[in-house]
Amino acid sequence: MSFEQQLEAVRVIAGLDKVEVKTEAGCRFLYLPQFFKTKSGELVDCLFACDNHQGYPNRLWFAKDLSSEIQGNWNHKNFCIIGRLWSAFSMKGKGANLSEILLSHMAGSR
């Protein structure tokens, strides 16, 4: 499956009209606006690192620190990527394609 086909699959499962691909330091990121819904109902932007980034084969970043809601080792807080601050917990998503990997990150955040 090509990157473009995987991108389209992510767009569909995310329920977004468009998924923006951003690149920084050789890593492709998928910008997912208002993708994660907190327990209080707030929608939070996410940034999904498709490639190796900060020692992880992939990573899901949140536009705010959700350590009070999501268990895990929040070892990167207020990390600047594409000119914006993001936070992430320690997790290596698993799957055969971007959709499966993203869904594994989502399952790990619940």
Image (spheres, helix red, strand yellow):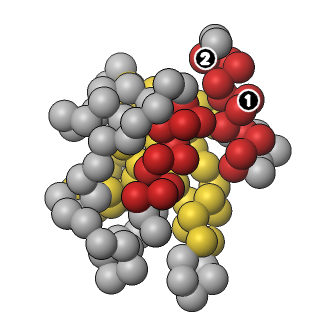
Q: Does 41 sit above or below residue 49?
A: below
Mark 2, residue position: 3
Q: What count of labels does the image hold?
A: 2
Where is residue 64 shown, x and y percent of the image?
A: 41, 69
Label located before the other in sequence (2 or 1)? 2
Q: Does 50 sit above or below residue 14?
A: above
Query: Horizontally, is 42 left or right of 87 in the view?
Result: right
Q: Amino acid at mark 2?
A: Phe
Q: Amino acid at mark 1?
A: Glu
Q: Residue at x 40, y 58 (%)?
A: 108
Where is residue 83 shown, x and y percent of the image?
A: 41, 47
Farthest residue to the bottom: give it. Answer: 40
Q: Does 6 sit above or below residue 20?
A: above
Q: Residue at x 20, y 63 (%)?
A: 73
Q: Which mark is residue 44?
A: none
Mark 1, residue position: 8
Relative to the observer, which residue lies in front, 39 or 25?
A: 39
The reply to whether residue 84 is visible in this rendering is no
